[in-house]
Image: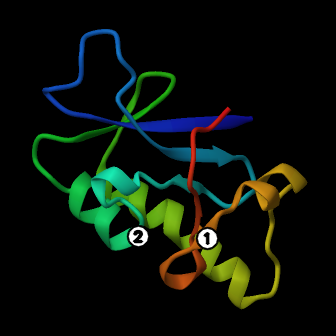
Amino acid sequence: MSVNYYAVTPETPEGDEGLHIGKHVGGKEFLFRAHRDLGLVTVAAWTKFLSREDVKVMAESGYEVPWQEFMADVTKRPADAIRAGERRMSGWERKAVSFRAERGVPFYDGEFC
């Protein structure tokens, strides 16, 4: 099962999912979506953006996740898995990783399909 996450702000149009943060596939690394036009290409940049008071982290199923809990969850597994030498990514995810940011966290530099 996979879950996409979105950043929703007061400027997000009604009915729009929001800014795509990335995708988590059960048991795999979270794959961040890079938004070069917004400077969101590092864990630090995403943390700064998501910690804003006017931003909500929303799962595609409609529930809100506190940004602190979200960032702890999506950045812990990649670093631990890489340190242990166990990158738990499927074939499509390996192909989708454009680059790795701080602590080896994977990013995709394009639109998710």
Secondary structure, mark 2, is loop
Q: Quadrant of residue 63?
A: top left
When the figure is inspected, residue 14 is found, relative to residue 101, above or below; the finding is above
- How far apart are labels 2 and 1 at the CA level? 10 Å
Q: Are marks 2 and 1 in contact (CB under 8 Å)?
A: no
Colour scheme employed for the rendering of this structure: rainbow
Bin the neighbour count of mark 2 within 10 Å (Cα to Cα): few under 14, some 14-19, many 20 and up. Answer: many
Q: Which residue is mark 2?
A: 42
Q: Position of residue 19 (x, y in %)?
A: 36, 36
Q: Quadrant of residue 39?
A: bottom left
Q: Residue at x 71, y 46 (%)?
A: 25
Q: Residue at x 51, y 69 (%)?
A: 75
- Point out the residue furthest to the top here: 15
Q: Position of residue 57 (x, y in %)?
A: 33, 41
Q: Which residue is mark 1?
A: 99
Q: Viewed as shown, does residue 57 lie left or right of 90?
A: left
Q: Viewed as shown, does residue 78 lie left or right of 36?
A: right
Q: Amino acid at mark 1?
A: Phe
Classify the position of the C terminus by image quarter.
top right
Mark 2 or mark 1, which has the lower sequence index?
2
User: Which label was assigned to residue 61?
Assistant: none
When the figure is inspected, residue 40 is found, relative to residue 42, above or below; the finding is above
- Point out the residue furthest to the front here: 37
Q: Position of residue 109 (x, y in %)?
A: 56, 55
Q: Position of residue 8 (x, y in %)?
A: 27, 32
Secondary structure, mark 1, is strand
Q: Amino acid at mark 2?
A: Thr
Q: Residue at x 53, y 46 (%)?
A: 22
Q: Quadrant of residue 16?
A: top left
When the figure is inspected, residue 113 is found, relative to residue 97, above or below; the finding is above
Bin the neighbour count of mark 1 within 10 Å (Cα to Cα): few under 14, some 14-19, many 20 and up. Answer: few
